[in-house]
Amino acid sequence: MNNIGFNKYGINKEIIRALNVLGYEKPMEVQSKVIPLVLEGKDLIVKSQTGSGKTGAFAIPLCEKIELETNKPQALVLTPTRELAVQVSDEITNIGKFKKIRSVKVYGKQPIQMQIRQLKQRVHVVVGTPGRISDHIKRKTIKLEDLKYLVIDEADELLNRGFIDQVEDIIKKLPHDRKTLLFSATMPEKIREICSKYMISPEQIQIESKNPTTKKIKQAFYEVEERDKVSLLKNIINEEEPESCIIFCNTRQGVEKLTNKLKRQGYYCEALHGGMHQNIRLRTISKFKMGQFNFLVATDLAGRGIHVDSLSLVINYNVPFENEAYVHRIGRTGRVEEKGIAISLVSSNEEERFNELKEYLNYEIPKGKMNNKKPKVMNEKLKKKPKIQRDVAENFNKDITRIRINVGSKKKIRSGDILGALTNIKGVSGEDIGIIDIQDTCSYIEIFNKKGDMIWKALQNNKIKGKNISAKKIRIRRSTNRF
């Protein structure tokens, strides 16, 4: 594939190669406006809706500007949620895969010692939530001396979640000559204050959606008594036949109750809320993106920053407490150039709240016709087990092998020792070796260009720094994200 769209920026061939593998041929609007300005070294304020391609807009030029041989972080990305931190970090890793850029994600409720171990190695980009980033800065486990870029992603949501003071504290500790890139769907006054206080002559970019929300997303609401919501929900699902759908509830208890009801009646669905362990939440999101189940029943935890391709339907089982939450919820569908459907179920107890919402939106949501019939038998299409979707990022796996060797930092092994041993194998060059992750008692190596089997066999009777080693091929975990 000849990636003419991104070649015009003079981007490193290894980044172009990764974009080709990911299947991207031409920049989205926000990318075409942001990438050249980042490459020129400008501070930027970007107002752009979620789903516009903004992650790629900063990830691509950051990967281009990273100096590989510098050991300390050169870019710091702040995100409002753990889920978004994982997603952004994985995007940077994918885009910088063949350039060998190392991105580390740090967030709360993950063992900090594991993060410290990762940060001791060569790290180019750190992505994380403000609380955990602040913790690492206090511990001096994130080195700031070589930091050149700060990205504040979804700044308005950082403000909404009460993180803005932490963000300011972090900014004050960073080198003054860094570049700052701020992305936000809205621009509250507090965000503008931060921009004027901490940015140098920033360029301002505003991306207007070619398809306004009212046109991109077909919206409707149904008046229904609370006791009849499940019946109406099933009728809507039967009629719309969504490949994937998020159903939003306002509380954890509501999510669990509805999920259990739907599961008992044969629907492929899972729950997502803040009371779940972090690893389970991330695994649930990953399974939903891969199409292992059709229906995700969630609180507003999933309403911001969780990007799912081809989500055709969003249902507000409860009217959200906050006006902005409605916009974020329905924004899960109708992403980029796609269209979607958003339906709200409004009980008599929620009418006043819904009227306030419509006044805030300043447009009329059409009323659907109440279906008083009993739910039809479940649509045959929905009875079938969903087919697992192939993630575009899995294309990397065709040419990459991951090998684990049984020596690490406790044996005084460095990445240069491993690289030297591998490139001494006949037919192997530095271009065939990806990121080398050295842990205490073992090390992980990415092998490119389909040379994994050859290198694995050569390592069976080999030594590194005079030490006998054993090598094992490791299955590469599925990537969960797209940019």
Image (cartoon, rainbow, N blue to C red):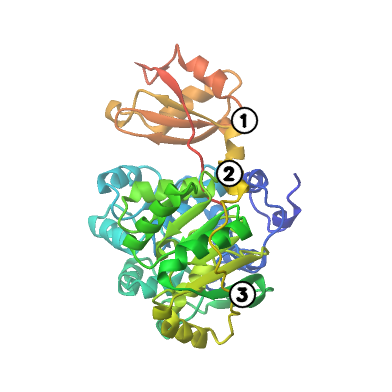
Which of labels 2 and 3 is toward the front?
3
Comes first in the chain, label 2 or label 1: 2
What residue is shown with label 1? 449
Distance (Cα) linking label 2 and label 1? 16 Å
- Whether residue 401 is visible, yes or no, is yes
Going 68% across and 46% down the picture, which residue do you hit? 20
Report whether 390 appears left or right of 437: right
C-beta proximity under 8 Å, tags 2 and 1? no
Comes first in the chain, label 2 or label 3: 3
For the view shown, which residue lies furthest in the front direction?
373
Which of labels 1 and 3 is toward the front?
3
Give the vertical position of 453 relative to 355 (above or below). above
Distance (Cα) linking label 2 and label 3? 29 Å
Q: Which mark is residue 393?
A: 2
Give the vertical position of 58 relative to 222 (above or below). above
SS at badge 1: loop
Q: x and y percent of residue 155 in the render?
A: 44, 72
Report whether 12 appears left or right of 275: right
What residue is shown with label 3? 213
Going 48% across and 80% down the picture, which residue do you hit? 187
Give the vertical position of 21 relative to 331 (above or below). above
SS at badge 2: helix
